[in-house]
């Protein structure tokens, strides 16, 4: 005995005069669904909703702790600009002392050689500076690098001095410490001179002009770049730096934070280019 299958109901017909939803109404429905989705839309920084930037404080002019407890300086302004170009709001950016924990997505102040290829993991440079000399305000016996041959010197960057004067001089005359501690040693007369990055020394001299002076004779050149934690970030960081160079923000930051040295940095440095990864044979 065969069974009769139930009839499929006919499709509903639109009643005469009934109206379809308007295009604006459909748009609002779609927008409501989009904002109800619990996905955080971030910039090209990886979609985690925040950006961790490592900085090295204690370098007046470049990066230092502000009176409010945050960070201030030329590098901080560069970092903020880059973060915004990558799609992050200021409240999504977290600054940490580098190196440290948590690991940073970007790290400011990474050395880049001027006359040799740099590592592909470092974007930039955003500044090319040089080593200079800080001496006592009334000490005119220190005018250039060779004047340090019989002087007690403090530095945070011993390599250029050791290369120039040798290991015996290092043992007899050189103290290695932070730039700020070296400046205190100079002001108290424990050393005759301090060497370090010209931008940092200019900031230290501005703090105590009655005690120390910037000699103004650079003896090495080095670039500062931004280390990136992931390869996919480097192109975006370079694009952000290029935009900062082009729209005048870089020059304004130089004048605002590097003060007396602004004349030494009239134009931005040339960004390094890196070959893309080779395809497999």
Image: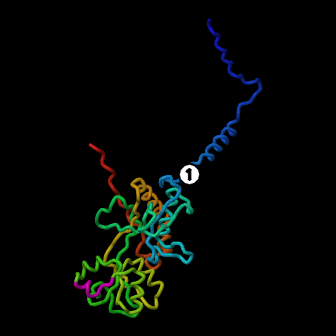
Q: Quadrant of residue 123?
A: bottom left
Task: Name the side, left or right, on which 250 lies relative to 165.
Answer: right
- Count of numbered labels shown in the rendering: 1
Dominant secondary structure of the residues highlighted in magenta in the image: helix
Q: Magenta stretch: residue 171 in it? A: yes
Residue furthest toward the right? 17
Q: Where does label 1 land, which residue?
A: 40
Query: Is residue 217 part of the magenta span, yes or no?
Result: no
Q: Residue at x 42, y 65 (%)?
A: 107
Quarter occupied by residue 181: bottom left
Relative to 60, does residue 38 appear above or below in the rendering?
A: above
Assess disc 1: are there few (<14), some (14-19) or many (≥20) residues with their C-alpha within 10 Å of its C-alpha.
few
The quarter of the rendered structure image containing the C terminus is top left
- Nearest to the observer: residue 184 or residue 129: 184
Q: How is the image coloured?
A: rainbow
Residue 219 is drawn in which quadrant? bottom left
Q: Nearer the viewer, residue 104 or 256?
A: 104
Q: Is residue 51 above or below residue 39?
A: below
Q: Is residue 23 left or right of residue 275?
A: right
Q: Closest to the observer: 242 or 267?
A: 242
Q: Residue 273 in the image: x percent, y percent?
A: 35, 57
**Image: magenta residue range:** 168-175
Q: Position of residue 163 (x, y in %)?
A: 25, 78
215 lies left or right of 166: right
Residue occupying image coordinates x 55% and y 63%: 90
Instruction: Give me the residue at 47% from left, 64% from top.
Output: 53
């Amino acid at each position: 005995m065969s069974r009769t299958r139930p009839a499929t109901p006919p499709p509903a017909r639109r009643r005469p005069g009934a109206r379809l939803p308007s295009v604006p109404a459909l748009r609002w429905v779609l927008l409501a669904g989009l904002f109800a989705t619990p996905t955080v839309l971030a910039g090209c920084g990886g979609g985690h909703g925040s950006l961790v930037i490592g900085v090295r404080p204690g370098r007046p002019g470049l990066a230092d702790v502000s009176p409010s407890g945050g960070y201030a300086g030329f590098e901080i302004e560069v970092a903020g600009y880059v973060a915004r170009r990558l799609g992050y709001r200021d409240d999504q950016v977290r600054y940490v002392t580098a190196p440290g924990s948590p690991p940073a997505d970007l790290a400011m102040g990474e050395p880049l050689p001027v006359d040799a290829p740099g590592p592909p993991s470092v974007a930039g440079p955003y500044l090319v500076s040089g080593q200079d000399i800080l001496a006592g305000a009334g000490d005119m016996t220190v005018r250039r690098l060779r004047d340090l041959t019989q002087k007690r010197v403090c530095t945070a960057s011993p390599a250029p001095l050791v290369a120039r004067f040798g290991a015996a001089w290092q043992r007899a005359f050189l103290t290695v410490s932070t730039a700020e501690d070296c400046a205190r040693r100079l002001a108290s007369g424990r050393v005759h001179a301090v060497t370090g990055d010209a931008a940092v020394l200019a900031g230290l001299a501005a703090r105590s002009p009655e005690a120390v002076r910037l000699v103004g004779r650079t003896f090495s050149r080095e670039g500062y770049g931004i280390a990136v934690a992931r390869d996919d970030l480097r192109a975006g960081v370079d694009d952000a730096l290029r935009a900062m160079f082009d729209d005048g923000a870089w020059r304004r930051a130089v004048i605002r934070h590097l003060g007396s040295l602004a004349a030494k940095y009239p134009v931005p440095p040339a960004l390094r280019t890196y070959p893309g990864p080779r395809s497999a044979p």
